[in-house]
Amino acid sequence: MSSSSTSVVNYTYVGYDELDSYLKQRRNKSLLGFLTRYREVIVSSLTFSAISHWKDLDNTWSTRFLHEAKRIDRSNFARLEKKIKMERSRHEKDLESFWCDLVQECRIKQDISEHQAEKDRYLQIISNLEIQIQAESTDLSQLTKKWHLKKILLDNDDDYDERPYFFLDIPNFGEASGPSHNGQQQIPEDLGEADNNRYTDLGE
């Protein structure tokens, strides 16, 4: 029962396939050698929330290493277990350096991921603001053109501002044309030639 439960656990962690392959193919097995060869896989197996003290990580992977080695080759396990124990004692500083650097790398990657997400959020805000500014600039330009056209008509006709409905004379901004005799909108080609006949009835 315990063997079945342990087997399920060992077949689910990231890096199991690499560990299994290493132990089956390498004649001269080494914990530090395995960790160094498959460092990127081990890095990918960690999450920021799961990062703990380097000794906890070292114990976890040494336990996995020995557990899988025992499953693959029980007859030589005692000798390998003794070798790994000596290796961990002899290379404690190297293992500490390995795990501390790995933990730091994971934290840096997490920071980069968070900062990238924040950058993307600000870029989206900037993009939305640019769209809003463009729309508002278009509205502003149309308003400016509307009143600039009225000013031109005033400058070219001294009596223009005294006529009734002066403010209804120019089409609303955004329209491409003004009123004409057939009901269509048409802006006079020569703004200096105001159509006085248009105001004959209104001026009486």
Image (cartoon, helix red, strand yellow):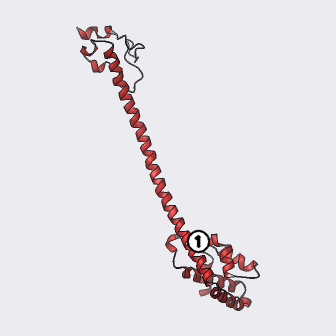
Residue 1 in sight here: no
Residue 166 in sight here: yes
Question: In the figure, residue 201 lies in which quadrant?
Answer: top left
Question: In the figure, residue 71 lies in which quadrant?
Answer: bottom right
| Coordinates of residue 7 in the picture (x, y in percent) | 62, 81
Is residue 66 depicted above or below 36 in this figure?
below
| Coordinates of residue 86 in the picture (x, y in percent) | 66, 89
Q: Secondary structure at mark 1?
A: helix
Residue at horizontal 75 percent and vertical 79 percent from the top: 26
User: 178 or 182: nearer the eye?
Assistant: 178
Is residue 40 depicted above or below 185 in this figure?
below
User: 186 or 57: nearer the eye?
Assistant: 57
| Coordinates of residue 14 in the picture (x, y in percent) | 61, 72
Please name the amino acid that badge 1 sits on: Ser
Q: Which residue is mark 1?
A: 45
Residue at horizontal 46 percent and vertical 49 percent from the top: 124
Residue at horizontal 39 percent and vertical 30 percent from the top: 141
What is the quadrant of the C terminus in the image? Answer: top left
Is residue 58 depicted above or below 104 in this figure?
below
Residue at horizontal 38 percent and vertical 36 percent from the top: 136
